[in-house]
Image (cartoon, rainbow, N blue to C red):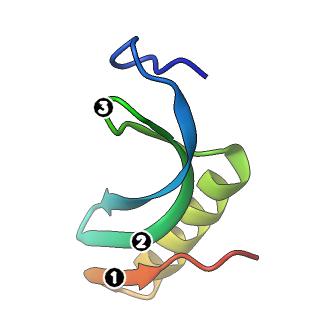
């Protein structure tokens, strides 16, 4: 897929680190599978990965976490 940010690079399978912030929660997830632009490094997540990250963020927010760093684990 052509990168919509830089308009020059093509994406390829890789991993990225995602940081999600909500109210007082900052969630950092490393090793998230993504399509990553070879030119600018922009990462694109698929729908299932995004859903799982948002569910994790919701769980951590409800538990009262303020800062959480974790490694992505595939289902």
Q: Mark 1 — residue?
A: 69
Spot the residue most to the top.
Answer: 7
Local secondary structure at mark 1: strand
Q: Which residue, given by chain and number where applicable, does mark 2 sit on?
A: 29
Residue 24 point in image, percent of width and height? 23, 70
Q: In this view, does 16 lie to the left or right of 72?
A: left
Q: What element carries label 2?
A: strand
Q: Which callout, 3 or 2, points at the residue further toward the start of the chain?
A: 2
From the top left corner, tell me how far across and down residue 16 is, in percent.
42, 57
Of the two numbered discs 1 and 3 in the rendering, the one whose residue sits closer to the viewer: 3
Q: Residues within 10 Å of mark 2 (few under 14, many from 20)?
A: many
State the quadrant of the N terminus. top right
On the image, the x and y values in percent for residue 37 come to 44, 34
At horizontal 55% and vertical 63% (from top left) the residue drawn is 53
Quarter of the rendering containing residue 48: bottom right
Query: Callout 3: 10 Å neighbours few (<14), some, many (20+)?
Result: some
Instruction: Tell me the quarter of the picture where residue 12 sits.
Output: top right
> In whole angstroms, how far apart are the C-alphas of marks 1 and 3?
25 Å
Q: Residue at x 34, y 39 (%)?
A: 41
Q: Do the residues labelled 1 and 2 touch (CB within 8 Å)?
A: yes
Left or right side of 71 for 53: right
Q: Is mark 3 on a helix, strand or loop?
A: loop
State how far apart marks 3 and 2 are (Cα).
20 Å
Give the residue pinned by disc 3: 40
């Amino acid at each position: 897929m052509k990168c919509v940010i830089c308009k020059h690079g093509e994406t390829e399978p890789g991993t990225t680190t995602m940081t999600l912030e909500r109210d007082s929660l900052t969630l950092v997830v490393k090793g998230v599978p993504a399509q990553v632009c070879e030119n600018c490094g922009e990462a694109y997540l698929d729908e299932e990965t995004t859903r799982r990250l948002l569910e994790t963020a919701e769980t951590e927010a409800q538990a009262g976490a303020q800062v959480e760093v974790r490694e992505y684990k595939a289902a």
